[in-house]
Each structure stands twice: as structure tokens, then as C-alpha cells.
Amino acid sequence: MLSREDIMADMGQYRVLSREHAEVTQIAGRYARFQQREADLSNAQALLSDPAFAEMAAEEIADAQTELTQLEAELQRQLLPKDPDDGRNAFLEIRAGTGGDESALFAADLARMYTRYAEKVGWRCEIVSANESELGGYKEVVLRLEGDGVYGALKFESGGHRVQRVPATETQGRIHTSACTVAVLPEPDEAQAVQINPADLRIDTYRASGAGGQHINKTDSAVRITHLPTGIVAECQDDRSQHRNKAKALQVLSARIQEKERSERAAKDAATRKGLIGSGDRSDRIRTYNFPQGRWTDHRINLTLYKLNFIIEGDLDEPLTALRHAHEAEQLAELEVGAGA
């Protein structure tokens, strides 16, 4: 009889192979279409000399050439090296920064924005931990997003997000500037999670605060874990079970330790080269949300959209697609430079 570990390993391998099959199938389909349009182009060019078909052939040649250019660009993007973490679930951390209560309210707006986008695309979303402010915002909130390609879709959201608007607490109508930081961390699987020495951990339990009914405040179910060598802290108060909260907090802790290691590697790379999209360091100011003008701007790719009201309600398809295409263009440019060296 298979053990739980064997079953989990088989399921993990099945998911990996399913993603690979879907990717290969998509590439094969695009290439088959490319070959078909090449044949169409060749046939149309052969008909150009026939006066009866010349006009129709010229139209077909123009259509085929346009589609072949698009297909070639798609195939180039699809064949670019993939980040092995792109298919993973993710933890999304939002922290209020400068701006006091207004920053905390903006953190809640961002959390709602990502939550609504997750609902739109069919991801599962849960709050792992939350530190609420007095006015209903978040000083800090950690979401876990589960679904196909979560990390790959959201990884460029890491960084500093700035908001310009009239706060609800402003009595004179003045525009204030506040900021939050966002960090998107891939959820490590059990096989690849960093090995943490239990002796390096300090585990504290406490009573959860906030919503949850009477029970959540009567027991010490919330868990805070500190990794002593690095000082990294993770906590969870989402569940009534202390055991399940501890397991979730350990997942977040492992993801944060891995992210610290990744950031250190990226910092070394950035000493010689800084990419268009940036390192994802949360100290980078990547985004501005200007409510008086209805303007959303990503400073890394110089993209401005005057549809802020839609974006803040979770309509993130256009921004996320633009960021992905900018990253792919950067990868292609690097490959061309490498090929010419």
C-alpha cells in the first residue's frame, strides 16, 4: 500500500507533467499553424502570375505574412526559458508604509484588488495572517493564492506601490501620497522546501485578534515562529487549530527564507546588470495609483492606463500581460546579445 508521502510525490509529479504537456501542446499547435500558413503563402505566391487569381492571391499573401509574423513572435516567447517557480502557488504580502492610516487603508484596497482578480481567474484565496488598523485597513496582511501559474502571473507585483488621493480622514480636500510594499513569494513544495533546524526556531502562541467569533479569542490558537539565525518571522491566526496555524506559518517562513536567498543572488546579479522589470525588491517604487486623474502607472515599463477604477476592482489582465511581455522582450534581447557575442 502506498504511503501518504508516496501519494503526495505522485500527485506532485502528475501536476508537473500535466503543466509540461499543456505547454508542449500549445507550442505544437502554434507551430502547426505556422507551417500551414507558410504553405498558404507559398501557394498564393504561385498564383500571382495568373491574372484570374492575382488579386485574391495578393490578399492571401498579405494575410499570411501578417499572421506568420505574429506566430513567430508567439513561438519565440513560448520557447523562452521558463522560471521553474512560475507554476507554483504564492504567498502575497502587503505592508502599509508611509502615510499612517491612509497607507493601511490602501493596503486593504490592494488586498481586495488581488482577491477579486483571484476570484475572476478561478484561484483559491485565503488570508494567512492579518494585522488590522483602527480604521479597517491593514498594517500587514498575508494572502495565500492557489491555482495554475499564480506565481508566474503575479511575481512582477513585488515592490513599492504608491497612492495619490484625498484620504477619507482629510477634511480639507488635500491630496496625500502614501505607500505600501508588496512581496510575492512562491510557495515551496515539501520536496524543495528549505531544511530548517527545529533548534533554530522560537515558537510563540497567542490569542488571535479580529473577526472569527468567540472561539478564536478564547484559545491561544495563533502561532508566531521566529527563525533565530535570520530574524525572519512568520505568523498565522487564520485557523482555529493551533496545529494547522503552525503548519501554515512554517510554510510562510520557508517561503520567506527562500526569498531571502533568491534576493541575495539577485543582488549579486544586479551589481553587473539591472533588468527592465527590476529585481522585485520591495524597496523599488514600481507603481503609482493616482485617483484624482484615474491614472495607473507602472514606472518600470513606462505604461500608463487611465482605467484605475477598473484596475483597483481587480481588472488586472492588461497590466499583468504588459509586464509579462516586457519581461519576454527583455529575455529575447539578452539572447540576441548573447548570440552576437
Image: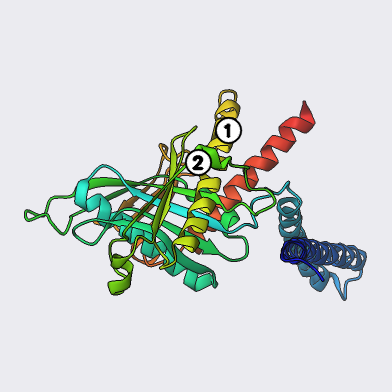
- Name the N-terminal-most of marks 2 and 1: 1
Q: Which residue is mark 2?
A: 280
Q: Quadrant of residue 126?
A: bottom left
- Tell me the CA gap for discs 2 and 1: 9 Å
Q: Which of these two is toward me, 52 or 148?
A: 148
Q: Amino acid at mark 1?
A: Ala
Q: Amino acid at mark 2?
A: Gly
Q: Which of these two is toward me, 309 or 21?
A: 21
Residues at discs 2 and 1 in contact (Cβ within 8 Å): yes
Compared to residue 216, the image places residue 288 above or below, namely: above
Residue 184 point in image, percent of width and height = 50, 50
Residue 13 point in image, percent of width and height = 77, 61
Residue 293 point in image, percent of width and height = 27, 56
Q: Which of these two is toward me, 247 or 326?
A: 247
Please indicate whether residue 171 sits to the left or right of residue 38 in the image: left
| Mark carried by residue 224 | none
- Is the residue marked by circle 2 packed among few (<14), some (14-19), or many (20+) residues within 10 Å? many
What residue sits 51% from the left and 44% below the top? Answer: 256
What residue sits 53% from the left and 38% below the top? Answer: 199
